[in-house]
């Protein structure tokens, strides 16, 4: 019999919806479940918002006091789905209370802040995970499997992108994602870190970066509510504006510790691109290419294919591939964003059940935060910057 674990989820916005859905759905997909999540209490900034979260997301209780909730003896897991500035205080308090922690990305606003979180979970000996869910797409996990099996040989080059357009309109509002004191950075922390996670997962540690960092939309209309509605469609012409003090675009070269090289392009200004997370990896025996907007598919080319069949071919992920036994029974039936969160939940609860740290954990989140720091420093200095240990 799977044991039950009580979850306190802090934050009830976009990610609150995604995580609550995964708690409900995970045992339906992965059965027997490693442990069964109980949606115990949801926390938001006001009692009204928290109660709305309770009714909407199926939690038993609600609260507007995360400090009291994370100390409750009946809580096993603390799930941090708030904007980035509250990740560290909540995680440190939860670790001190001995709770297992899953925290949304980026782990923190800076590498130094992430280090305080890593130190706290290490001291407490709890299970910890950072919610970089895109690596849980079966096609991405399949790419890793091929690489581990040596199917494309030694990796020489990684080319990654994360292109969006939801904030390309300069009249879309100044939500928390455009404020350094809350977000830490802009496109770098918000979306660039996802691809840094993929690069580290698939290729290895990033040692040095040389980046061009830009803020094209230097002011935006002041937003009235706290929730980020990710609103390109929301028109605010005429509303009082304030300064954007974070980046909205970065292009960088990468040097990996093992000698591979690469590049990464990240922007929220790319009209026509929605969630365009791509990578192409070239090795000494073949290549792999992935585009999240076609996430059931992995493009592969093996150099030893017969000469008359050389070229990229499409593998549609299904039961024969990573996580396939728990997901859908026919390839290409359709993997969505939700499935990545369900798989993430499965891996996190499996880690708690087995007592073994999952990946990416807070150490990965910390190292990724150091890459983000290096990108910002390089953008300012205009030269190569080594990623701090
Ligand atoms: P959001 O703005 O939609 O929701 C944030 C929620 O947290 C709101 O309900 C807000 O009232 C609440 N909140 C804020 N401060 C709080 C506090 N101190 N205590 C309790 N509740 C608080 O934000 P969203 O998009 O859900 O982002 C949350 C986190 O998730 C961020 O770190 C973000 O980077 C990350 N994220 C990750 C995604 C992924 O694909 N893995 C996708 C979207 C966001
Ligand atoms: C906005 O850029 C956003 O919601 C990010 O915060 C998420 O991490 C990304 O996965 C989707 O886009």
Image (cartoon, rainbow, N blue to C red):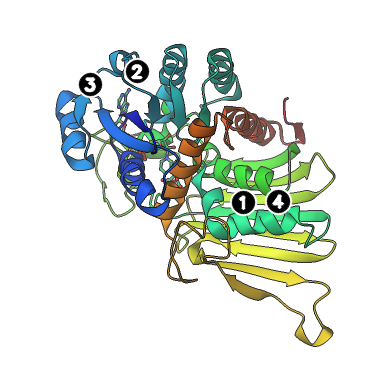
Q: Position of residue 87 (x, y in %)?
A: 44, 24
Vertical comparison of 264 with 301: above or below: above
> Which residue is denoted by mark 2 in the rendering?
70
Marks 4 & 3, CB-CB < 8 Å contact: no
Label 3 C-beta lies within 8 Å of the nearest ligand 1 atom: yes
Vertical comparison of 200 with 122: above or below: below
- The mark nearer the N terminus, 2 or 1, is 2
In the drawing, does residue 184 fall left or right of residue 368? left
Between 202 and 177, the one nearer to me in the picture: 202
> Which residue is denoted by mark 4 in the rendering?
263
Q: Nearer the viewer, mark 2 or mark 4?
A: 2
> Which residue is denoted by mark 3 in the rendering?
64
Marks 2 & 3, CB-CB < 8 Å contact: no
Q: Nearer the viewer, mark 1 or mark 3?
A: 3
In the drawing, does residue 10 fall left or right of residue 258? left
Marks 4 & 1, CB-CB < 8 Å contact: yes
- The mark nearer the N terminus, 4 or 3, is 3
Vertical comparison of 116 with 375: above or below: above
Is residue 185 visible in the rendered image? The answer is no
Q: Outermost residue, front direction? A: 1
Is residue 201 visible in the rendered image? The answer is yes
In the picture, the quarter occupied by the C terminus is top right
Q: Position of residue 198 (x, y in %)?
A: 62, 47
Q: CA distance from mark 1 to mark 3?
A: 39 Å
Q: Nearer the viewer, mark 2 or mark 1?
A: 2
User: What is the quadrant of residue 60 in the picture?
Assistant: top left
Q: Nearer the viewer, mark 2 or mark 3?
A: 2
The residue drawn where x is 55% and y is 39% is 188
Q: Residues within 10 Å of mark 4 (few under 14, many from 20)?
A: some
User: What is the quadrant of residue 176 in the picture?
Assistant: top left
């Amino acid at each position: 019999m799977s044991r039950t674990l009580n979850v306190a989820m802090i934050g009830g916005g976009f990610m609150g919806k995604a995580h609550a859905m995964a708690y409900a759905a995970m045992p339906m997909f992965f059965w027997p479940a490693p442990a069964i999540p109980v949606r115990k209490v949801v926390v938001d900034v006001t009692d009204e918002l928290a109660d709305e979260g309770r009714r909407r997301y199926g939690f038993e209780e609600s609260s507007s006091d995360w400090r009291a909730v994370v100390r409750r003896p009946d809580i096993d897991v603390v799930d941090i789905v708030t904007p980035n500035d509250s990740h560290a205080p909540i995680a440190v308090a939860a670790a001190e209370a001995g709770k297992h922690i899953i925290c949304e990305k980026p782990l923190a606003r800076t590498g130094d802040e992430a280090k305080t979180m890593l130190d706290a979970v290490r001291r407490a000996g709890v299970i910890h995970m950072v919610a970089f869910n895109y690596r849980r797409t079966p096609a991405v996990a399949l790419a890793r499997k091929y690489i581990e099996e040596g199917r494309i040989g030694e990796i020489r080059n990684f080319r990654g992108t994360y292109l969006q357009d939801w904030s390309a309109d300069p009249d879309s509002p100044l939500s928390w994602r455009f404020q350094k004191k809350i977000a830490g950075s802009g496109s770098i922390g918000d979306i660039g870190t996802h691809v840094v996670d993929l690069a580290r997962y698939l290729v290895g540690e990033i040692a040095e970066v040389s980046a061009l960092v830009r803020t094209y939309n230097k002011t935006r209309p002041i937003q009235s509510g706290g929730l980020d509605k990710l609103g390109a469609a929301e028109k605010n012409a005429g509303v009082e504006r304030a300064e954007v003090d974070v980046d909205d675009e970065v292009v960088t070269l990468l040097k990996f510790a093992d000698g591979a090289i690469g590049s990464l392009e990240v922007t929220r200004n790319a009209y026509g691109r929605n969630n365009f997370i791509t990578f192409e990896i070239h090795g000494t025996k073949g290549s792999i290419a992935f585009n999240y907007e076609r996430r059931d598919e992995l493009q592969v080319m093996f150099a030893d294919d017969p000469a008359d069949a050389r070229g990229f071919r499409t593998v549609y992920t299904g039961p024969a591939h990573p996580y396939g036994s728990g997901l859908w029974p026919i390839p290409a039936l359709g993997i969505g964003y939700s499935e990545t969160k369900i798989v993430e939940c499965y891996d996190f609860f499996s880690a708690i059940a087995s007592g073994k740290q999952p990946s990416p954990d807070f150490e990965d989140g910390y190292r990724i935060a150091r890459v983000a720091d290096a990108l910002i420093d390089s953008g300012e200095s205009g030269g190569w910057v080594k990623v701090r240990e």
